[in-house]
Image: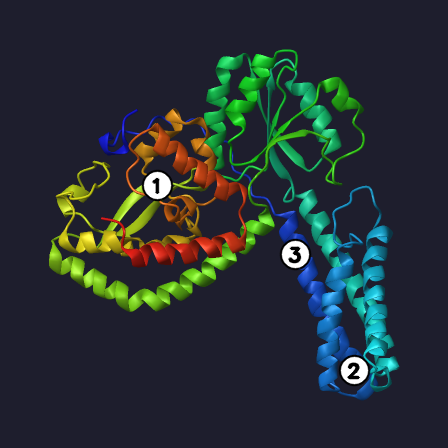
């Protein structure tokens, strides 16, 4: 196996035509907005009830405490009652009954807490009743409003999930008809295959399509009477940046009237789940924005000094920009402080630097040893190209080589690349010399992808600080 240091830039291969882009709304985000709106309305309802009872929006300091407790109780009760779940086949009365039932239990729980804490005599019962009544009206209006928005979005296809069906050409039309009947919100593109030889070409087309628009799921319908063909389907598509499912035989699928998890999809075997849900991606994105903005503010004086040092040390621009591959194979330009001579940086050669490399400038050696050359990538985080924590992005030529040598390498791109990652803080950094080093690095990246949490991100960021202060690079 050739090492990464032996690779030079090659012209990119012709891209497979990307799938058409379709803009869709996220049902999870819409549900989150519904929850937040309801919380705000319940706060306003408490103020209105106080105004009706006492003639003022805030009667006492205890009112604020009770409102906070009520919001927490409502969140805790609404979950088990499925007050905000998407349960198709249920009428408006069922949904509204669950929501108002959760609010009624919340008020009942608040009354119990008042008696348990011996503060019931200090709490106005009329205010509590008024709050419950105004809250019921507010929640009912909110639910009807969001139902109208949901219906409007459904009519225009904005809530449709995008999927791709990959099946032998003889079964495609029948499978599309059955799947659409079971889940009308699933918009399916089809890739009919004449033989196993088309598998890789289909996978390449999906990867290019994901670079334009996120894909919710890939449904495989391999011939189940041929285990070799079944394995070829699964192994080819299991590392795509989307949920990968295997459909049961058509005859079984037609009899599957019950749906899984209330989403309208027939029961299918999961081959590869997306590592982060839409809600988790939103949480990670908000965390990245907050921390990246704070870090840029904190390090801006240091970055100005570094920029000045680079300009004084050698001719050429301060920043080095290079095309990289990110989430879903989307291309972006990564920002770094220039650490090599300008002639080496613009030569088109993507050979990585090694200890003692003559192309590295004096300031560049300090920046590489301290990893300060990565600071401009905070701009990539703010732009949404990268995350603070994730698998490190490689040059396009390296990506092409590694994906050919290790099939699961592509699974790293199921999350956004990061400034730092689990591989980097675990000692797997720098030049990849052989297959064993590549396998070790990818294994660490996949452990991160499959076990993501905010706590894991925090641990990696703290360990990154320890690695930086040790100055253990060249």
Judging from the image, what secondary structure is the residue with disc 3 in?
helix
Q: Which mark's residue is nearer the viewer, 2 or 1?
A: 1
Residue 401: x, y in percent?
33, 28
To which residue does mark 3 refer?
32
Pick the front one: 53 or 277: 277
Left or right: 78 in relation to 33: right
Q: Which mark is residue 50?
A: 2
To which residue does mark 1 refer?
324
Residue 249: x, y in percent?
71, 19
Pick the front one: 406 or 467: 467
> Residue 69 occupies which quadrant of the picture?
bottom right
**As drawn, 155 above or below 219:** below
> Residue 440 occupies which quadrant of the picture?
top left
The residue located at (47%, 21%) in the rendering is 200
Query: In whole angstroms, how far apart are the C-alphas of marks 2 and 1?
Result: 58 Å
Q: Which mark is residue 198?
A: none
Query: How many numbered discs, if any?
Result: 3
The residue located at (51%, 36%) in the rendering is 241
Q: Quadrant of the N terminus?
A: top left
Query: In whole angstroms, how far apart are the C-alphas of marks 2 and 3?
Result: 28 Å
**As drawn, 44 above or below 333:** below
Category of crowding for the residue at label 1, using alpha-carbon neighbours closer than 10 angstroms: few (below 14), some (14–19), many (at least 20): many
Chain-order first, disc 2 or disc 1: 2
């Amino acid at each position: 196996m050739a090492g990464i240091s032996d690779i030079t830039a090659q012209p990119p291969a012709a891209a497979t035509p990307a799938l058409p882009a379709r803009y869709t709304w996220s049902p999870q985000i819409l549900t989150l907005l519904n929850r937040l709106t309801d919380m705000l309305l319940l706060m306003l309802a408490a103020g209105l009830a106080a105004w009706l009872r006492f003639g003022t929006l805030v009667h006492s300091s205890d009112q604020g405490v009770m409102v906070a407790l009520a919001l927490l109780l409502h969140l805790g009760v609404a979950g088990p009652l499925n007050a905000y779940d998407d349960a198709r086949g249920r009428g408006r009365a069922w949904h509204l009954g669950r929501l108002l039932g959760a609010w009624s239990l919340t008020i009942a729980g608040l009354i119990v807490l008042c008696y348990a804490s011996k503060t019931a005599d200090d709490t106005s019962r009329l205010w509590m009743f008024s709050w419950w009544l105004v809250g019921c009206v507010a929640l009912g209006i909110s639910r009807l409003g969001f139902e109208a928005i949901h219906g409007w979005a459904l009519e225009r296809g904005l809530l449709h999930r995008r999927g791709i069906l990959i099946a032998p050409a003889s079964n495609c039309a029948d499978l599309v008809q059955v799947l659409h009947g079971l889940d009308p919100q699933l918009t399916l593109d089809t890739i009919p295959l004449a033989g196993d030889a088309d598998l890789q070409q289909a996978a390449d087309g999906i990867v290019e399509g994901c670079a334009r628009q996120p894909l919710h799921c890939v449904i495989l319908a391999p011939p189940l009477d041929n285990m070799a063909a079944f394995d070829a389907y699964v192994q080819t598509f299991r590392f795509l940046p989307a949920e990968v499912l295997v459909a049961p035989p058509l005859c079984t699928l037609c009899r599957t009237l019950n749906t899984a998890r209330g989403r309208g999809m027939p029961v299918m075997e999961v081959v590869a789940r997306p590592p982060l849900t839409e809600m988790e991606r939103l949480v990670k994105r908000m965390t990245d924005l907050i921390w990246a903005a704070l870090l840029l503010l904190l390090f801006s004086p240091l970055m100005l000094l570094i920029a000045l040092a680079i300009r004084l040390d050698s001719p050429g621009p301060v920043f080095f920009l290079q095309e990289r591959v990110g989430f879903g194979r989307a291309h972006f330009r990564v920002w770094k402080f220039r650490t090599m001579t300008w002639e080496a940086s613009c030569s088109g050669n993507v050979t990585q630097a090694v200890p003692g490399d003559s192309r590295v400038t004096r300031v560049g050696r300090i920046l590489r040893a301290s990893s300060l050359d990565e600071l401009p990538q905070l701009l990539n985080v703010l732009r949404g190209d990268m995350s603070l924590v994730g698998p490190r992005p490689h040059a396009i030529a390296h990506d092409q080589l590694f994906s050919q040598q290790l099939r699961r390498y592509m699974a790293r791109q199921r999350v956004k690349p990061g400034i730092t990652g689990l591989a980097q803080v675990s000692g797997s950094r720098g030049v990849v010399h052989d297959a064993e080093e590549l396998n070790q690095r990818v294994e660490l990246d996949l452990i991160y992808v499959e076990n993501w949490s905010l706590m894991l991100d925090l641990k990696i960021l703290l360990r990154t600080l320890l690695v930086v202060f040790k100055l253990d690079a060249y």
